[in-house]
Image (cartoon, helix red, strand yellow):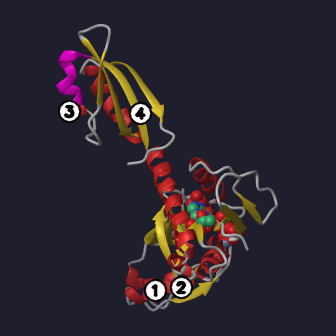
Amino acid sequence: MNGNLKLAIQKSGRLTEKSLQLLRACGLDIENYSDRLIVSARNYELDLLFLRDDDIPEYVQDGVADIGIVGEDVVIEKEADVEIIKRLAYGRCRLMLAGPEDRNIPELDQLNGKRVATSYPKILSNFFRNNKIDAKIIQISGSVEIAPSLGIADYICDIVSTGNTLKLNKLKKFITVFDSEAVLIGSKNLTSDTEKFLKLKNLILRIESALNAKNSKYLMMNIPKSALQKIREILPALKSPTILPLADESMLAVHAVIPSEMFWEIQEKLHLAGASGLLLIPIENMIL
Ligand code: PRT
Ligand code: ZN
């Protein structure tokens, strides 16, 4: 066994592409993985293990992999003894209760005695226990949404993202049981192995920098000197902007890092305040 950090990610599914994108944004050179189970990064002491997502929490718990990227829903459902190191802000979805759209939306206590189909029996039974509901959980491994029309359940509890699957099956959601996103998980034994722990700390720093960069943009503009105060009030107070002189002495160049989603909100105000030549540029990495 080499001393490389072992990171498990989903082999083929909703999290695969975004996980690889994140790792590449961290500067890791990962070849196209095709059908291989293990791939080593060319420029970092890291081996990628491609697994079914359901197996990742247990493999990390048992130390087969040191760390893993998987949906938080799967981590909690598998009751794995691992640490959630970092939320990764993709793969967002909700585990929700839903029922036939032609029936009234039930109050939670009206679920007593009802049958609810799900692939998440543990999360759901915890939810029912916490809310003192006595419903029958029907465990199904896939296509949970067809359970009511087959007559095997009254309601379902399933992952919802756009809501299209529910609509197609004439179901409507009524209560959120769990909010999920992709998370980086780690083995609890990792601290004992200091060299690997240092590699992990470095990788986490890179991941944080990549996530910060993804959510931020670099904004450049020219402004009349007299508008500086107004422009500073419009810009978010992340950090003070960079202010540079221009050949035209009545003008200044202003550069600032802004949250990506804020651009359309502030660009009109900036224009009205006298800014011109706005340039919005992606940021590759950002270490705070
Ligand atoms: O083969 P493997 O076991 O590895 O993959 P899988 O098929 O079990 O998992 P996969 O790839 O479907 O999902 C991986 C993770 O993505 C999940 O654990 C969630 O954390 C997250 N995720 C995000 C989703 C969805 N969005 C999602 N929409 N997981 C599943 N769905 C399914 C849902 O089950 C339902 O059937 O998509 C349907 C609903 O989607 P909408 O958009 O129609 O609402
Ligand atoms: Zn799975």
Q: Which residue is mark 1?
A: 126
Q: Nearer the viewer, mark 2 or mark 4?
A: 4
Q: Which residues are magenta?
A: 224-233
Magenta-drawn stretch contains 127: no
Instruction: Name the side, left or right, on which 269 lies relative to 151.
Output: left
**Amino acid type for the residue under numbered disc 4:** Tyr
Instruction: Name the side, left or right, on which 266 lies relative to 63.
Output: left
- Percent across and percent down for residue 235 are 27, 34
Quadrant of the image where one finds ligand 2? bottom right
Count numbered badges in the picture. Answer: 4
Quarter-of-image position of residue 144: bottom right
Nearer to us in this view, 268 or 119: 268
Q: Earlier in the sequence, mark 1 or mark 4?
A: 1
Q: Earlier in the sequence, mark 4 or mark 3?
A: 4
Q: Are marks 1 and 4 in contact (CB under 8 Å)?
A: no
- Percent across and percent down for residue 118 are 59, 79
Q: Which residue is mark 2?
A: 122
Separation of disc 1 and disc 4 at Cα?
45 Å
Name the residue at 69% across, 63% down. 48
Magenta-drawn stretch contains 230: yes
Q: Nearer the viewer, mark 4 or mark 3?
A: 4
